[in-house]
Image (spheres, rainbow, N blue to C red):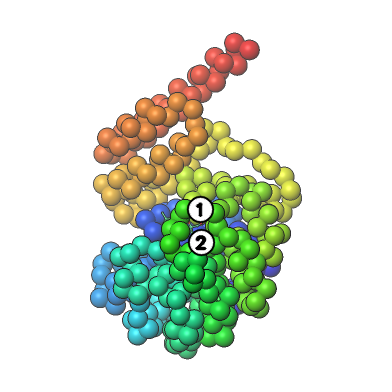
Amino acid sequence: MLKIGDIEIKNPVVLAPMAGVCNSAFRLTVKEFGAGLVCAEMVSDKGILFNNEKTLGMLYIDEREKPLSLQIFGGEKETLVEAAKFVDKNTNADIIDINMGCPVPKITKCDAGAKWLLDPSKIYDVVAAIVDAVEKPVTVKMRIGWDENHIYAVENAQAVERAGGKAVAVHGRTRVQMYEGKADWNIIKQVKEAVNIPVIGNGDVQTPQDAKRMLEETGVDGVMIGRAALGNPWMIYRTVRYLETGELIPEPSVREKIEVCILHLDRLIALKNEHIAIKEMRKHAAWYLKGIRGNAKIRNEINECNTREELVTLLMNFVEEVENKQQSNAQAV
Ligand SMILES: Cc1cc2nc3c(=O)[nH]c(=O)nc-3n(C[C@H](O)[C@H](O)[C@H](O)COP(=O)(O)O)c2cc1C
C-alpha cells in the first residue's frame, strides 16, 4: 500500500496537481471516482504570506477530498518555510508538497519550480528546513532535470530523502521539454531504485493500461495522472478498477459524462460564484465534450454562455441531440 509518512493511501492512483484546474470542485469530483490521493493546484508562498485573498481561498479543502496533498511554490527557503508553517497549522491538508517542476519562465525566473532542479544541495537545504518546521509529511514533485545536460533526478530525489522528505513524484520530462516529447520512464525507474521513500511516477499516463505499464516497468509505488483526467474524471475510476481486477470498464454514456460536467459546474459555482465559475467552466466543458461526435458547434456556443441556465440548457440539448441520433442509427441497422 502507498503510504506517505503516516498517511495511508488506499490505491496507487494519484490526481496530479494542475494550476487553474485542481480546486476543491474538481478534486472532490475526481475523489468520488476513486482516486487514492488528490493534489491541489500550486499555491504561491508569498501569496500566503501576504494574506492575498485569492491565494488563501485556494487553501480551502473539503473533508471528503482527504487524503489531500497541498502544493506550495517559491524560490527562497525562508518564505517557503513560513508558508509551509501556515499550511501546517491552518489547513486540513494531509501532505505538504513542494513544487520543483513548474517550467513556466514567470516562475523559474524567481528561482522557483524547476529552477531548484539544478542544485541537489539547495534541495536538501530547503526540504530539511521545511521538514524541521512542520508536522505534516513533506514531499516534492519534480521533473527529471532542467535540460538533457542537467538530469539530476537521482541526486535530487536522494537529497529529498536525506532531508526527511516522505515521497517524491517524478514527471519524466525536463524543464526545457515543457509538455513536449515523451516522458522518460527509464529515469523514473532509476529514481525508484535509488531511494527508499515512495516514488510516484508521472508523465504520459493516458489510459488505464499505461498506468499498469508504468507500475510494472518502473516499479513505482504510485501513478500520477494529469491531462488524461481533464474533463475525464472517470479515467481515474477506470484505472483503479483495471489495476485491481484487470477489467477495462467502458467509457460512460454521453448523458453520464454531461451529468458529471454539470455536477462539477455546480460545485465550482458554490466554490467561487456563477460569473467566475461559468468562465472557468468553458475550458472544462470543452474537455468533457472531447471525443463526442458532432461537438464542434456546441464547443463554440459554450464560449458565449454567461449563466448556469444557458450552459446547462446547451449541454442537455446536446445530449438529446446525440441520443436521438444514436436511436435513429440503431433503427436504421
Ligand atoms: C493545466 C496544467 C496545470 C499544471 N499545474 C501544475 C501545478 O500546479 N503543479 C505541478 O506540480 N504540476 C503542474 N502541472 C504538471 C502536471 O502535474 C503533470 O506533471 C504533467 O501534466 C504531466 O503529467 P500528464 O502527462 O499525466 O499530464 C500542470 C499541468 C497542466 C496540464
- Label 2 crowd (10 A; few <14 / some 14-19 / many >=20): many
Percent across and percent down for residue 49 are 29, 77
Q: Position of residue 133 (x, y in %)?
A: 44, 87
User: Going 37% across and 79% down the picture, which residue do you hit?
Assistant: 80
Q: Is residue 32 above or below residue 148?
A: above
Look at the image and tell me in which quarter the N terminus lies: bottom right
Disc 1 is placed on an element classified as loop
**Quadrant housing residue 328:** top right
Q: Classify 10 Å Cα crowding around label 1: few (below 14), some (14-19), many (20 and above).
A: few
Q: Position of residue 152 (x, y in %)?
A: 53, 74
The answer to whether mark 1 and mark 2 are in CB contact below 8 A is yes
- Residue 181: numbered disc: 1
Closer to the camera in the image, 208 or 257:
208
Question: In the image, what residue type sits under mark 2?
Answer: Arg
Q: Is residue 16 above or below residue 298?
A: below
Please determine whether, in this image, residue 190 is positioned above or below residue 122.
Answer: above
Kind of residue at badge 1: Gly
Per the image, the residue denoted by label 2 is: 173
Question: CA gap, disc 1 to disc 2?
Answer: 8 Å
Please give the name of the residue rendered at 37% of the width and 56% of the height, measured from the top-left corner: 20
As rendered, which of 192 and 281 lies closer to the eye?
A: 192
**Residue at the extreme front of the image, as rendered:** 149
Q: Is residue 137 visible?
A: no
User: Which of these two is toward me, 4 or 277?
Assistant: 4
Residue at the spot x=64%, y=70% of the render? Answer: 190
* Residue 112 visible somewhere in the drawing: yes
Q: Under 8 Å from ligand 1: the CB of mark 2?
A: yes
